[in-house]
Image: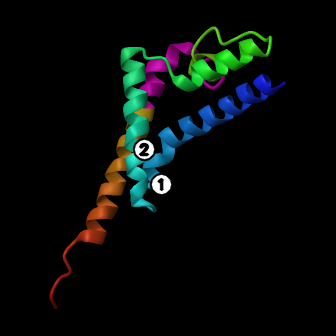
């Protein structure tokens, strides 16, 4: 029972991490300090995708599911829960590009907001 709860909790945390990866740059518009964890998330996301690194959350969930007597994850987290559910497999590259564009847009907006806040005041 405890292993199953751990697996389920890990799955929920993993979804939260992915949502933060997608929208964290917009949170920076309100909380500038959020750029640090968002940069870390984006770096990890790009690295794991480009280099094929295994996510520790996926490994933890897989281990916990196997310890509970259930089947583990036969694929990665995104392949298991998202690809084929939210979008077809053939759109993986398009979805990755879309996510990259959303993150780039959010960072550009954060930079514009930062510049406005830190712009020298005009002398009038």
Q: What label does residue 38 carry, if any? A: 2
In screen coordinates, is 77 left or right of 35?
A: right
**Element at label 2:** helix
Question: Which quarter of the rendered picture does the C terminus lie within?
Answer: bottom left
Q: Farthest residue toward the bottom? A: 124
Q: Position of residue 82 (x, y in %)?
A: 62, 23
In the picture of the structure, the residue carrying the numbered disc 1 is: 27
The residue under the point 71% across, 25% down is: 7
Q: Position of residue 118 (x, y in %)?
A: 25, 70
Residue 115 visible to the viewer:
yes
The residue under the point 43% across, 20% down is: 93
Q: Earlier in the sequence, mark 1 or mark 2?
A: 1
Foreground of the two, 46 or 36? 36
Q: Give the image quarter of residue 63.
A: top right
Residue 106 drawn above or below residue 8: below
The residue under the point 35% across, 42% down is: 104
Residue 86 is a magenta residue: yes
Q: CA distance from mark 1 to mark 2?
A: 9 Å
Q: Farthest residue toward the right? A: 1
Question: Which quarter of the rendered picture does the N terminus lie within?
Answer: top right
Residue 80 drawn above or below residue 45: above
Q: Are marks 1 and 2 in contact (CB under 8 Å)?
A: yes
Q: What range of the chain is rendered magenta? A: 82-98
């Amino acid at each position: 029972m405890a292993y199953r709860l751990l697996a389920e909790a890990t799955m929920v945390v993993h979804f939260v991490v992915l949502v933060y990866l997608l929208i964290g740059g917009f949170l920076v518009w309100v909380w500038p300090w959020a750029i640090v964890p968002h940069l870390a998330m984006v770096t990890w996301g790009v690295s794991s995708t480009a280099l094929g690194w295994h996510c520790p959350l996926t490994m933890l969930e897989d281990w916990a599911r196997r310890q509970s007597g259930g089947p583990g994850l036969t694929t990665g987290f995104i392949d298991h829960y998202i690809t084929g559910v939210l979008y077809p497999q053939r759109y993986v590259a398009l979805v990755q590009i879309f996510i990259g564009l959303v993150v780039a847009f959010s960072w550009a907006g954060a930079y514009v907001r930062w510049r406005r806040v830190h712009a020298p005041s005009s002398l009038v």
